[in-house]
Image (cartoon, rainbow, N blue to C red):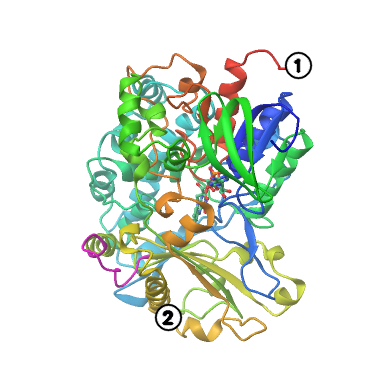
Amino acid sequence: MSSNKEFDAIIVGGGHNGLAAAAYLAKAGREVLVLEKLEHPGGAAVSAHAFDGVDARLSRYSYLVSLLPQQIIDDLGLRVTLARRRYSSYTPDPADGSRALLVDNGDEAATAASFAAVGAPDGEFRAFTAFYAACRQLTEALWPTMTSPLLPRSVARSLAARAGVAEAWEAMIEHPIGHAISKNLGSDLVRGVVLTDALIGTFAQADDEDLQQNICFLYHLIGGGTGDWDVPVGGMGAVSGELERAARDAGATILTSADVTAVRPGGVVDYRHGGQDHTVTAAWVLSNVAPAVLNRLRSRPAEGAAAGAAAAGISAGAAAAAGNPNHRREGAQVKVNLLLKRLPELLDGSVSPEAAFGGTFHINETWSQLDAAYRTAAAGSVPSPLPCEIYCHSLTDPSILSPELQAAGAQTLTVFGLHVPHRLVTAENNEDRRAELQAAVLASLNSVLAEPIEDLLLTDPDGRPCIETKTTLDIERAVGMPQGNIFHGGLDWPFVEDGEPLDTPARRWGVATDDPQILLCGSGARRGGAVSAIGGHNAAMAVLESEPPLRNG
Ligand SMILES: Cc1cc2nc3c(=O)[nH]c(=O)nc-3n(C[C@H](O)[C@H](O)[C@H](O)COP(=O)(O)OP(=O)(O)OC[C@H]3O[C@@H](n4cnc5c(N)ncnc54)[C@H](O)[C@@H]3O)c2cc1C
C-alpha cells in the first residue's frame, strides 16, 4: 500500500468521468483515490502535442462537446468555455463536387437555396427543419432525465406524451430511425447528412432492428436538449483539466502511472506503481474503465459474468458490467489528425473554405454511400470512398496553436472516418491497415478539393508531414477502449425497461454491477457515453445516496 491514508472510494481510471466522480465525492467530504494507468489523466478527452517539435495542442481523440450538462459545470465550478459554431454542416454532392449543401444557422434563406442547389425535392428544407424540430421537442423533454434517477420506459414515454411528442418518441425510440428519415426526406444527400448522427462510432445500418443506431442518434441530439456540438476552447484537454483541478481542489488524490491489475471482492484493488505492487481497500470501487476491462480485472470471462448476472437476478445496467453483449460491441471508425499550412480550396467555388470547414464537413456520406460502405466493411474490406466527417478546431478556437502558427495561417483538421469496424484490424495487419485507412481518408477528402490535401500538410522539424492516424486498435492500446469503441461498448437507452429493478441507488442511477461495492462511473454506465461527465456524476450520486456515514465523521 502506497500510503497509510484510508479511502472511502477508489476510482479505477482517471478519464474525465473518473475525475468528475472524484470531484463530486471529494466535495462531499469523501476520501477519494483515483488510479490512472497513463502518465496523465483525461483518458480520451485530452489535448496533445501530436507532432514532435510543433506547438499545436490537438484534441487528439474527442473534439466536440454536447453532452456536458450545465448543472455539472456549475456544481463543480468548471471554468470551461464552449464555443458555438455558426455553420451546422457542409456536404458536397458526390455526383458533382461543384455543388454542395451548406446548412447555415445564421442564414435561413441561403440554407433553403442550398437545398435547391443540390437538387433536393421541393419542400425538403421545410421537412428537414420540421424533422429536427420534432426531434428537439423530444430531446428537450428527455435531457433533464440524464442526471436524475432512471425512469422506466413507460414513464419516459408518458413524459414524452405529456410534452406532446408521442410521434417523435415513436420515430426515434420505437422504430428504426431509417424509417423516419426516409419517410420525411427525399434527397439521398440530405438523408445521409441526417443518418450520420446515428452512425458515429457505431457499426450499424439505418434500418437495423436492434435500434443501436437509434440510441446513437438520440445521444447525438440530446445534449443540452438542443444537440448543439460546441468547440471546447483550449481543446478537449481544457475540459478534463478543469475536472482534474476540481477534483484536486476538493482534496481527491490522483495517482498517475498507476496500473490497476485486479479488482477483488470486498472493495480490494491491486495496482502497480513505481515498479511495485500495491493493494488498497475502500468501501466503494468506481470503475471508469470499460465494462469489458472491469471484467478482465475481476478475472471474469464475459460469458461467465453474464451467467452470474442472470443468476443474481439483474439485467441491463447491472449486466453492463457483467457480460451484456451490447458492451462488447466493436468500435467502427478511423481518426485522423492533420495540421495544415492553410485551409484547402474547394471544388465548389461558391462557398468559402472558412464556411465549409466552419461546421461539420461531410464527405461521401449520402444515404446510399453509407449503405454501400456498411456492406463493403461487413464483407471485410475498407469502404471506397470512405465516408468521412471533418472538423476544423482552429477556425473557432485558434488558441490551440502557437502565435507563430496562428500568424502563418495554419489550421487543424480532425477527420472521423465511418464504417471501419474493428474486425478489419488485427495486431498483425495494424500497420498496413493504418496506412490503407490514411490513404482512404486522404482520397475521400481530395475527392471534394481543388488541390491535393497532401500539398498543404505542415512538416515537423525533421521534415515529417503533420498527420497522425489512429485505428481502433491504436485507440484500444492508447486509452484502453475495448476494440476501439469510443463509448466503451454499445450505448444504452437513457431509461430502463419496465420491470427492471430500481431498488438500490446504484440501479436507480444506472451504475450497478453484480457486486454492490463496485459501480460503473465511465462511458459504459447507462447514460455515460461521450464527453459528458454524466457517468461520473451518476456514480457519485449513487454513492452519496447509499452512503454509510462518513468514515471519520
Ligand atoms: C477518436 C474518438 C473521438 C471521439 N469524439 C468525441 C467527441 O467529439 N465528443 C464526445 O463527446 N465524445 C467523443 N468521443 C467519446 C469520448 O471521448 C468518450 O466517450 C469519453 O472520453 C469516455 O470518457 P471516460 O472518462 O468514461 O473514459 P476514458 O476516457 O476511456 O478513460 C478511461 C481511463 O481509464 C484508464 N485505464 C484503463 N485501464 C486502466 C487500468 N488498468 N488501470 C488504471 N487506469 C486504466 C485509461 O488510461 C483512461 O484514462 C470520442 C472518442 C474517440 C476515441
Give how far across and how far down residue 261 sits, in percent: 54, 42
The rendered magenta stretch, by its main secondary structure, is classed as: loop
Characterize the local packing of mark 2: few (<14), some (14-19) or many (20 or more) Cα atoms within 10 angstroms: some
Tell me the quarter of the image containing the C terminus. Answer: top right
| Residue identified by numbered label 2 | 347
**534 lies above or below 425:** above
Q: Which mark is residue 552?
A: 1
Q: Quadrant of residue 253?
A: top right
Q: Nearer the viewer, mark 2 or mark 1?
A: 1
Give how far across and how far down residue 358 sits, in percent: 55, 64
Q: Is residue 380 magenta?
A: yes
Query: Identity of the amino acid at label 2?
Result: Leu
Q: Residue at x 73, y 28 (%)?
A: 27
Could you tell me how far apart the alpha carbons at marks 2 and 1 are, in whole angstroms? Answer: 67 Å
Characterize the local packing of mark 1: few (<14), some (14-19) or many (20 or more) Cα atoms within 10 angstroms: few
Q: Secondary structure at mark 2?
A: loop
Q: Residue at x 63, y 13 (%)?
A: 548
Q: Secondary structure at mark 1?
A: loop
- From which residue to which does the magenta span run? 376-387
Q: Residue at x 69, y 34 (%)?
A: 74
Side of 240 relative to 99 (left or right):
right
| Badge 1 residue CB within 8 Å of ligand 1 | no
Can residue 81 be seen at all in this image of the molecule? no
Can residue 4 be seen at all in this image of the molecule? yes
Give how far across and how far down residue 454 sits, in percent: 50, 83
Query: Identity of the amino acid at label 1?
Result: Asn
- Whichever of labels 2 and 1 marks the residue nearer the N terminus, that label is 2
